Image (tube, grey):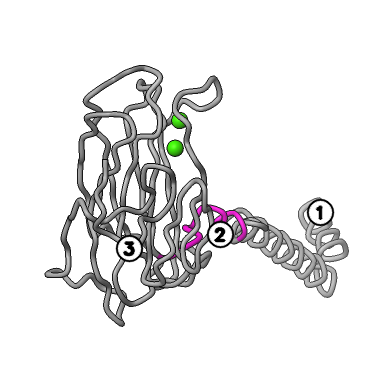
C-alpha cells in the first residue's frame, strides 16, 4: 500500500504538467547563468579602455631618430636632425616641418637616470635626411665619450594601434661615434628615403662638412662646408 501511495503522491506533486514546468524553469535558469558567465568572460578578455591603452604605447611618428649615451656619465649630448626641407631640429629649435625633438636630455639629474634623446617625424618625407650629434657639456669630464644613434621607420599611421599594418618600427641605420672634446659636432649619417619610405642604400654617407648646430648654434653661412669643430 505504501508503495502505491508513494507513486500516487509522486504523480500529484511532480508528475504531469508540474514536472514540465519545473524542468523548464531549471533550463531557463541554467541558460541565464551561462549567458552571464559568457558576458563576464568577454569583458575580461577585452576590458573597456584596452584599445585606448594600446594607443598610448605606439610611436607618435614615422621616422624615429634615437641618441643614447652612458647613464653614468653626466654629460649633455644633443641630437640634431635635418629633413629634406632643410630646417635642423634640436634643443634650440624643437619643431620643424616634419621633425620634432621630444626632449632635451641634459645629463644626469635626480629624477633623470637615463641619457636618451629622440626625434620623431610626421610622415616619411622623400629626400635627404641628416643626423648629427653635439657634445654641449660634460660635467663629469668623461672623454672620449661614445654615443649610439639609431634610425627606425614605421610606415603605419602615427598613433595607430600597435597591431595595425606597418605600425612596427624597423631599424634602418645604427652607428656609434666618439666625442674627443666639448663642443664637437659629428655628422653620424645622411641618407635618402624613396617614395615608398624605404632607405636608398647607396645614398648613405658621412661628412664633417654637414653642420646642423654649429659653434654658436647657427647654420654656417652658405650651408655646409665652412668647417666644424
Ligand atoms: Ca641634450
Ligand atoms: Ca639624462
Judge the density around disc 2: few (<14), some (14-19), many (≥20) Cα neighbours within 10 Å.
some
Q: What label sits on residue 144 in the rendered view?
A: none
Vertical arrangement, residue 71 with respect to residue 90, above or below: above
Percent x, y for residue 53?
A: 59, 54
Residue at the disc numbered 3 = 223
At 45% from the left and 58% from the top, the residue drawn is: 120
At 37% from the left and 42% from the top, the residue drawn is: 215
Residue at the disc numbered 2 = 55
At 39% from the left and 49% from the top, the residue drawn is: 213
Report the mark closest to the observer, 1 or 3: 3
Quarter of the image where one finds residue 185: top left
Disc 1 from disc 2: Cα separation: 77 Å
Q: Which of 156 and 24 is in front in this view?
A: 156
Quarter of the image where one finds residue 127: bottom left
Q: Do the residues labelled 1 and 2 touch (CB within 8 Å)?
A: no
Percent x, y for residue 87?
A: 44, 64
Residue at the disc numbered 1 = 1
In the picture, which quadrant includes the C terminus? top left
Query: What is the magenta range?
Result: 52-62
Q: Are marks 2 and 3 in contact (CB under 8 Å)?
A: no
N-terminal of the two: label 1 or label 3?
A: 1
N-terminal of the two: label 1 or label 2?
A: 1
N-terminal of the two: label 2 or label 3?
A: 2
Q: What element carries label 1?
A: loop
Q: What element carries label 2?
A: helix
Report the mark closest to the observer, 2 or 3: 3
Magenta residue check for 226: no
Amino acid at each position: 500500500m505504501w508503495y502505491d501511495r508513494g507513486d500516487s503522491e509522486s504523480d500529484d506533486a511532480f508528475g504531469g504538467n508540474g514536472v514540465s514546468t519545473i524542468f523548464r524553469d531549471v533550463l531557463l535558469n541554467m541558460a541565464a547563468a551561462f549567458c552571464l558567465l559568457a558576458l563576464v568572460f568577454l569583458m575580461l578578455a577585452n576590458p573597456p579602455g584596452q584599445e585606448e591603452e594600446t594607443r598610448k604605447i605606439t610611436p607618435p611618428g614615422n621616422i624615429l631618430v634615437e641618441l643614447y649615451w652612458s647613464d653614468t656619465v653626466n654629460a649633455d649630448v644633443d641630437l640634431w636632425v635635418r629633413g629634406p626641407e632643410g630646417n635642423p631640429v634640436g634643443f634650440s629649435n624643437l619643431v620643424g616641418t616634419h621633425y620634432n625633438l621630444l626632449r632635451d636630455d641634459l645629463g644626469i639629474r635626480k629624477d633623470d637616470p637615463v641619457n636618451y634623446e629622440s626625434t620623431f617625424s610626421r610622415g616619411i618625407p622623400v629626400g635627404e635626411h641628416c643626423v648629427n650629434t653635439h657634445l654641449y657639456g660634460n660635467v663629469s669630464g668623461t672623454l672620449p665619450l661614445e654615443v649610439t644613434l639609431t634610425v627606425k621607420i614605421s610606415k603605419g599611421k602615427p598613433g595607430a594601434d600597435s597591431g595595425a599594418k606597418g605600425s612596427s618600427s624597423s631599424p634602418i641605420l645604427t652607428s656609434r661615434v666618439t666625442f674627443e672634446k666639448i663642443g664637437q659636432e659629428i655628422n653620424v649619417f645622411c641618407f635618402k628615403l624613396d617614395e615608398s619610405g624605404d632607405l636608398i642604400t647607396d645614398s648613405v654617407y658621412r661628412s664633417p662638412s654637414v653642420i646642423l648646430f654649429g659653434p654658436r648654434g647657427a647654420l654656417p653661412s652658405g650651408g655646409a662646408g665652412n668647417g666644424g669643430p
